[in-house]
Image (cartoon, rainbow, N blue to C red):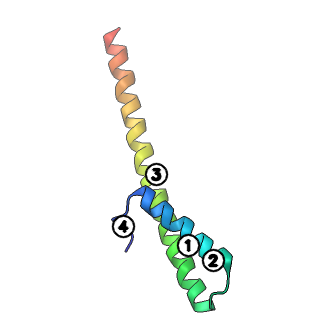
Amino acid sequence: MTTNLTFEAAYSQLEETVRNLEQGGLSLEESVKLFEHGIELARLCTELLNAVEIKVTSLQEELAKHIQTSD
């Protein structure tokens, strides 16, 4: 399971998975397993990025409110 990975670790594993698929020489079964793992890693990376985007947006809104009340 990949859910406990950091973004950096998941992205690194995704890059390695893509390299392995691009090199070829794998059986169909191995390729499908790697592809499935890559999809799982890509989803995790997307989820982590979305969570960070929400947090950054929230922090920006808080800062904007603080600046408005300070004026």
Q: CA distance from mark 2 to mark 1?
A: 6 Å
| Residue wearing tag 4 | 3
Amino acid identity at mark 2 = Leu
Question: Measured along the vertical axis of the image, is residue 58 above or below residue 45?
Answer: above
Question: Measured along the vertical axis of the image, is residue 64 above or below residue 13?
Answer: above
Is label 1 in a helix, a strand or a loop? helix
Of 71 and 40, the residue lying toward us = 40
| Residue wearing tag 1 | 17
Q: CA distance from mark 2 to mark 4?
A: 22 Å
| Residue wearing tag 2 | 21
Q: Quadrant of the C terminus?
A: top left
Is label 3 in a helix, a strand or a loop? helix
Kindly report which numbered mark, 1 or 3, lies closer to the viewer in this rendering. Answer: 1
- Mark 2 touching mark 1, by CB under 8 A? yes
Q: Residue at x 44, y 56 (%)?
A: 8
Q: Residue at x 35, y 22 (%)?
A: 65
Q: CA distance from mark 4 to mark 3?
A: 13 Å
| Residue wearing tag 3 | 49
Is label 4 in a helix, a strand or a loop? loop
Question: Measured along the vertical axis of the image, is residue 55 above or below residue 32?
Answer: above
Earlier in the chain: of badge 4 and badge 1, it is 4
- Mark 4 touching mark 3, by CB under 8 A? no
